Amino acid sequence: MKIIQKLYKTLFIVGILMSNSCTDGFEETNTDPNAFIKATPESIFPGVVFKTLDLIGGDMNVNLFMNYASYTGGKGGQFPKFYYTESGLNGYWTRFYVDILKNNQQIIDNYSGNPLFANRVLIAKVWKSYVYSVMVSTFGGVPYDKALSTDTTVPYNTEEEIYTSILSMLKEAGDGLNTTGDKYSSDPVYNGDNAKWKKFANSLRLKIALRISTGFPALAEQHVREVMLKENDMINTNIDNATLKYGTAQENWSFNYRTFVYQTVLPSIYPYANHSFILHLKTFEDPRLQAMIEPANKPLVIRDNLYKSGSTTDKVVIEYAIPYYGKPLGTKQVLPSWNLNSQNSILQNVADDAYSGPKKDLFMNQDASFNVITAAEVNLMKAEAKVKNWGGVKSAETYYYDGIEASFLQYKITSGFATYKERPGVKWGTTNAGKRDHFGISTSAISADPMEKIVRQLWFALYNQGHDAWCLLKRTRGIVLPPHLGPDANAGSNGLYAETPERMVYAPIEIAVNSAAYKNALAIIGVDLFVTPLKINKPYTPTKWESVTAEYNQEFASYWYGYSEDDLKAAGVPYKIIK
């Protein structure tokens, strides 16, 4: 932290100047010569939002969170392989504290107590709560109370202390935001609509409270019960979604566009869709698959045993191509103890650039968006609150269906919901045996358990919200997903495989410049490792993947269009009868 404080005097000035250079909806240039002395909220906040978007919704989303959430398949780089680089991790730490939190705190420090700025201060507190909620659920306890002071040694607050504080700030904002009071004239999130900021504050409070429901159940229940009394003041429809958007001016291009489209990258670096994610979507014939994911660059040709045209008894072997298939986290890596013959793998000859990827016009374009909270997520969280008996005027089942429908509408899917909600495993109270993944080590099966259903649908709805989905998976253990079979040599079980990280390790810069506080933090959290669980993570026993029975199979692809040759004809799919 000491180095951060030294850097701040320079970086704050640079940050103001840089943020004012981003003009596509993010800032309005402030020409006040006294701006450094007391910058206006309008000259600070849009830049803070943009830097948050580019860090949490850009760099860290692509390189950490989308991999941890099993949204992205195996890709090159130490972060995607469940490890880190010192320069990268130090950079994240500095961007959090200097570029975002320090600048945002200027609004709170300079304008608190001034009634002319009351709403803008509360909105800055909402943003502070959001950013710290990401930090504490990523690293564990971090510097908080004195993080932005000039002290040379900055103590770490515990997870519980930080959650208690940010939930209190969100309650203050949800209660105190005045829809007719002052507002940001330059607001890149809600365009000065304080009613929507109030909904955001309440919805974020619900999200964070549920996130800590395993680790701090009493605190979680208190806040969930209180905020569930304000259902009308939450994000209930997509028009109120908290969405951050990049711009078309080059300085505001999205991280994905800058990184993967504007410049040529190796296929091994591209964020192709995860094999398990596509498997689960396809199991339930989920139309969001087509809305969220691009067809494969080179369709995979499979052989299927289907009913002959016009028959329900005679079968034929038919060869045809499937449009979607995802990349396993470890690509084609397997464990030696499985004794698999690679020649039996249907993906053996698939090139790195042949897999399905994120929908280009949604996630890879210049002005791509990133959702912080959506109506789909809020309704599904309300279903969870109801299951816990922590409030709600509707049934858990109704909230559940409302959440799925909101997710469909978010992706402009206006038909098929009535059919989808009746599918086995989707319909409340039903099960689905699912299908095996390519290696036969995990399945897309689902029980009738209400929480399992809510978690599965949240996972689908949270696509591209990598951090939220990672937190969901580790706080519920609601979906069993394969490990990374090709991790960094420093990660996992002797480098053979690695479970999804429980947390990110602390930035090496802290060990060097804030060592006393760092050591005190370790006394609370334990060992500074990826496998050290946070208080919010649900305890579990990791699978001994080297001991499971594995088998190459193509269940993820079989019967893609149906069980009959006639289904291929109806879909207009070219095919070849082999025998």
Image (cartoon, helix red, strand yellow):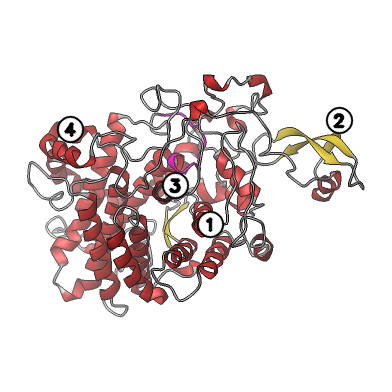
x and y percent of residue 406 in the render? Answer: 54, 65
Badge 1 marks a residue whose secondary structure is loop
Residue drawn where x is 61% and y is 33% of the image: 440
- Figure quadrant of the C terminus: top right
In this view, the residue in front, 244 or 142, is: 142
Residue drawn where x is 43% and y is 68% of the image: 235
Q: Which mark is residue 449?
A: 1
| Foreground: disc 3 or disc 2 | 3
Of marks 1 and 4, which one's residue comes earlier in the chain?
1
Q: Do labels 4 and 3 touch, CB within 8 Å?
A: no
On the image, which quarter does residue 355 sit in?
top right
Q: Do labels 2 and 4 touch, CB within 8 Å?
A: no
Q: Do labels 1 and 4 touch, CB within 8 Å?
A: no
- State the residue position of label 4: 511
Amino acid found under the numbered disc labelled 1? Asp
- State the residue position of label 3: 477
x and y percent of residue 129 in the render? Answer: 27, 58
Amino acid found under the numbered disc labelled 3? Arg
Work out how far the residue at label 1 is from the one at label 2, CA to CA, in angstroms.
42 Å
Res 30 seen here: no
- Figure quadrant of the N terminus: top left
Is 58 located above or below residue 429 in the figure? above
- State the residue position of label 2: 578
Q: Which residues are magenta?
A: 68-77
